Image (spheres, rainbow, N blue to C red):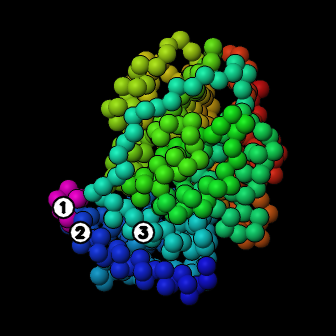
């Protein structure tokens, strides 16, 4: 999309945003002023980030808030923020996110679609389905796991394309997408960007996420019906064999709307389902939202929900949401992994360097002329062999970057 077409798109989004904001009062705690206060805080966050550069600040709001302010003019009198790479060259922040205006960076104007969709769907979401699959799988099985993959082929040699090709070559029994189709999980985005998803030889699964929820999960549930029949129209599922219980969780649907679904939550129906699942097996969890804090210092409230409902700690948990590949140190018998680096460009997260709670994270440059700061995108391959699990974190070129002992 060239800059002229992008600005035309922004004009269309601006009209939709103002219409949605005018209708928001009844659906946002009864107070439009509360919504405007959130938008103001997000705008101030962007201004501080440009001044402070690479340092990530505590308590940041979701960056999707920012773009509706800077390019849609939702706050009267607010400073106009940069919209093009020439106006604001890219900075790699300490958490690896790229602060800049190129596509998929934090100030990419196209993120405005996510904010507009969120405003338009404050009142209504697709009904939650409660017919989860409980499927038997072989005792020896291979799983291909990719997070935050839904960018589509946005450039020549896009990471999403390369990752899909590598997963397909490995012919795993099942493939699992941990969620996020961008910018807002619309029906068009789901249909266009998930067509190249590498299906497993026995089937595939895809999880709900904050970005799918901006569209009220309409696009997501249509995609389930179209390409993921094993899920029985439901956003959560389980697989089992003699040794393992594998869980795919919907951590987004019941998450807090006023925080753009950024913090995972399961809701009562899913918690009751978890509590009734078979006991006595090793547990592997897949979700979009994380089980650890980003620096691996503490377990999240979502973790406590899951462990409480299961009556035990999971053995392994793979999540996305953070655009990075991270292997955390074991916490007791629990092993946490972030594989949210399926497609979005990201850089070296220097805040993880020498972190005693981090075993490995991706630091190798991808040598990408379009994103010189980018480090390698990738995915995970997991092999369950009886009671054992072996792990490989792979890069976009099919090379092993980290493997369990």
- Magenta-tinted stretch: 25-32
Q: State if disc 3 and disc 1 touch (CB < 8 Å).
A: no
On screen, residue 110 versus residue 204, left or right, reads left
Q: In the displayed structure, would residue 402 be above or below residue 10?
A: above
Which secondary structure, mark 3? helix
- C-alpha separation, residue under disc 2 versus residue under disc 3: 20 Å
Q: Nearer the viewer, residue 373 or 377?
A: 377
Residue on which the image places disc 3: 66
At which x and y percent is residue 305? 40, 30
Mark 1 vs mark 3: which is more N-terminal? 1
Image mark for residue 26: 1
Badge 3 density bin: few <14, some 14–19, many ≥20, Cα 10 Å: many
At which x and y percent is residue 202? 69, 34
Residue sitting farthest toward the top: 280
Q: Look at the image and say whether residue 95 sits in the magenta stretch.
A: no
Badge 2 density bin: few <14, some 14–19, many ≥20, Cα 10 Å: some
Q: Quadrant of the N terminus?
A: bottom right
What number of labels is visible?
A: 3
Badge 1 density bin: few <14, some 14–19, many ≥20, Cα 10 Å: few
Q: State if disc 2 and disc 1 touch (CB < 8 Å).
A: yes
Q: Quadrant of the C terminus?
A: top right
């Amino acid at each position: 999309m060239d800059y002229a077409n992008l600005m035309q798109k922004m004009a269309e989004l601006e009209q939709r945003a103002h219409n949605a904001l005018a209708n928001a009062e009844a659906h946002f705690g009864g107070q439009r002023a509360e919504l405007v206060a959130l938008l103001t805080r997000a705008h101030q966050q962007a201004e501080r980030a440009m001044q402070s550069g690479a340092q990530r600040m505590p308590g940041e709001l979701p960056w999707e808030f920012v773009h509706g302010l800077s390019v849609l003019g939702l706050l009267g009198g607010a400073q106009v923020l940069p919209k093009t790479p020439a106006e604001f060259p890219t900075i790699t922040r300490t958490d690896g996110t790229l602060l800049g205006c190129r596509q998929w960076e934090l100030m990419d104007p196209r993120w405005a679609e996510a904010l507009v969709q969120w405003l338009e769907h404050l009142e209504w979401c697709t009904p939650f389905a409660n017919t989860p699959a409980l499927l038997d799988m072989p005792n020896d099985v291979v799983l291909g796991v990719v997070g935050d993959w839904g960018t589509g082929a946005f450039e020549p040699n896009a990471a999403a394309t390369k990752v899909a090709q590598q997963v397909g070559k490995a012919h795993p029994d099942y493939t699992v997408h941990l969620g996020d189709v961008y910018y807002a999980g619309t029906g068009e985005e789901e249909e266009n960007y998930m067509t190249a998803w590498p299906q497993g030889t026995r089937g595939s699964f895809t999880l709900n996420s904050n970005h799918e929820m901006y569209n009220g999960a309409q696009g997501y549930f249509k995609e389930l019906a179209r390409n993921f029949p094993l899920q029985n129209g439901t956003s959560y599922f389980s697989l089992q064999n003699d040794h393992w219980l594998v869980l795919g969780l919907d951590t987004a649907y019941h998450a807090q709307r006023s925080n753009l679904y950024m913090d995972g939550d399961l809701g009562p129906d899913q918690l009751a389902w978890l509590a009734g699942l078979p006991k006595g097996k090793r547990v592997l969890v897949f979700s979009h939202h994380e089980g650890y804090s980003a620096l691996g210092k503490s377990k999240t409230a979502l973790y406590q929900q899951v462990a409480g409902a299961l009556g035990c700690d999971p053995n392994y948990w793979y999540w996305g949401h953070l655009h990075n590949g991270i292997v955390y140190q074991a916490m007791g018998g629990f092993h946490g992994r972030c594989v949210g680096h399926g497609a979005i460009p990201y850089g070296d997260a220097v805040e993880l360097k020498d972190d005693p709670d981090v075993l490995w994270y991706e630091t190798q440059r991808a040598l990408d002329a379009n994103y010189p700061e980018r480090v390698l995108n990738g995915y995970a391959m997991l092999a369950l062999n009886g009671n054992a699990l072996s792990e490989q974190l792979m890069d976009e070129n099919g090379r092993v970057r980290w493997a369990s002992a």
